[in-house]
Amino acid sequence: MAFLTNQKYSSPVYLKAFHQFGRLSSTVDTTIALPDVSRIHAVIEFQKHWYIRDLSKNGLRVNGKLIKANHPQLLHINDQITFSSAQCTPFIVKSLEPPKDILLPSSQERGDDHGIQPIYLEHYHFLPNESSPELVVFYDQESQQWQCEHFENSILSPLHDGEQLKFSKQTWQLFKCESPENMDTLCLSAQEKNDLCYVFNISQDEELTELMIQSASESIDCQARSHHYLTAILARYKAEDIKQNVPEPSQGWRSIEQLTKDLGLPETHINIQVHRARKQLSELRQTTGIMIPDLIERKRGRIRLAINDYQVIKGSHLEIDTRGLAA
């Protein structure tokens, strides 16, 4: 992502998609406390490329030359930006990558001496790592905001710009650089949700579970993953309720407590499995362009399979076909 440096700043100035500079600290993104700097002096914005616009009364200089007021000027690597005649050191353009939301280490923990680098946010993150996560941060397309869930207490909450979170005994802050319209959308294909059928292949000893997502025109191999077995178990629960004519809104719901008994796994591990399933589908949406819904729905300590069209095959035996049940 794009950032500027300045000798007087201990950390890079990471650029938001619409980044304001000026003296009015309550409004701008980067404060420049000099007397001849306007309250909102200039803006750097991303429109396929990065541009700077002068909004001030006293002007600003790029590479020593005044630029035209309120006229976008294309930025280049190593451009030097000066907002004030009293400014001793210029801001230097060091990166012009597209904007990206990031987690920044808190100010007291930043710097090369500590070796702590920003975390560039994709769509799903197990933090500090996937093998021993303390929390998960993911982008929810429906609400168009970042969400955070702590595995210790299963509390899910939205993350707002500037909000802090802690893991690995470090404090981090969300720095939102992208605007919602710049976020990758999922509307990449006309593929409808109900065109998809999910096929779970469970080995005879139930040690291995594969998932295949099929449409009329293609198949997506989700390979063998441990979290597919959890999803297949939820598929069995839902099929049981369908056979017993349980109304659809109530079909398939099971408590985490029951799942811990049925699977012999602690609650934390089940929550990790749920997020691994969601993470895999999030990645598939980006690579395939197909609107693949989340397979698992959660509500107040309960979860269920969120889809209706699926098959469960154990060994070579077709155990469940919900399309047949629906008929």
Image (cartoon, helix red, strand yellow):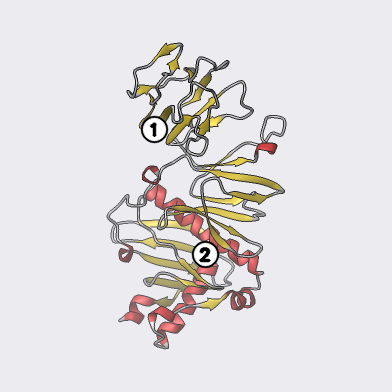
Give residue 175's mark: none
Q: Is residue 225 visible to us here?
A: no
- Percent x, y of residue 69: 34, 21
* Sooner in the amino-acid sequence: mark 1 or mark 2: 1
- Percent x, y of residue 80: 49, 17
- Dot 2 crowding, Cα within 10 Å, few <14, some 14–19, many 20+: many
- Percent x, y of residue 84: 50, 18
Number of numbered discs overlaid on the protein picture = 2
Q: Is residue 175 above or below residue 131?
A: above
- Percent x, y of residue 129: 63, 49
Q: Residue furthest front?
A: 35
Q: Is residue 293 above or below residue 90?
A: below
Give residue 46's mark: 1
Q: Is residue 150 visible to us here?
A: yes
Q: Are marks 1 and 2 in contact (CB under 8 Å)?
A: no
Give residue 228's mark: 2
Q: Is residue 266 above or below residue 216?
A: below
Q: Amino acid at mark 2?
A: His
What secondary structure is marked by label 1?
A: strand
In the foreground, 292 or 55 = 55
**Which residue occupies 38% across, 80% down?**
248
**Which mark's residue is nearer the viewer, 1 or 2?**
1
What's the CA distance linking mark 1 and mark 2?
A: 40 Å
Q: Residue furthest top?
A: 64
What secondary structure is marked by label 2?
A: helix
Say which quadrant the C terminus sits in.
bottom left
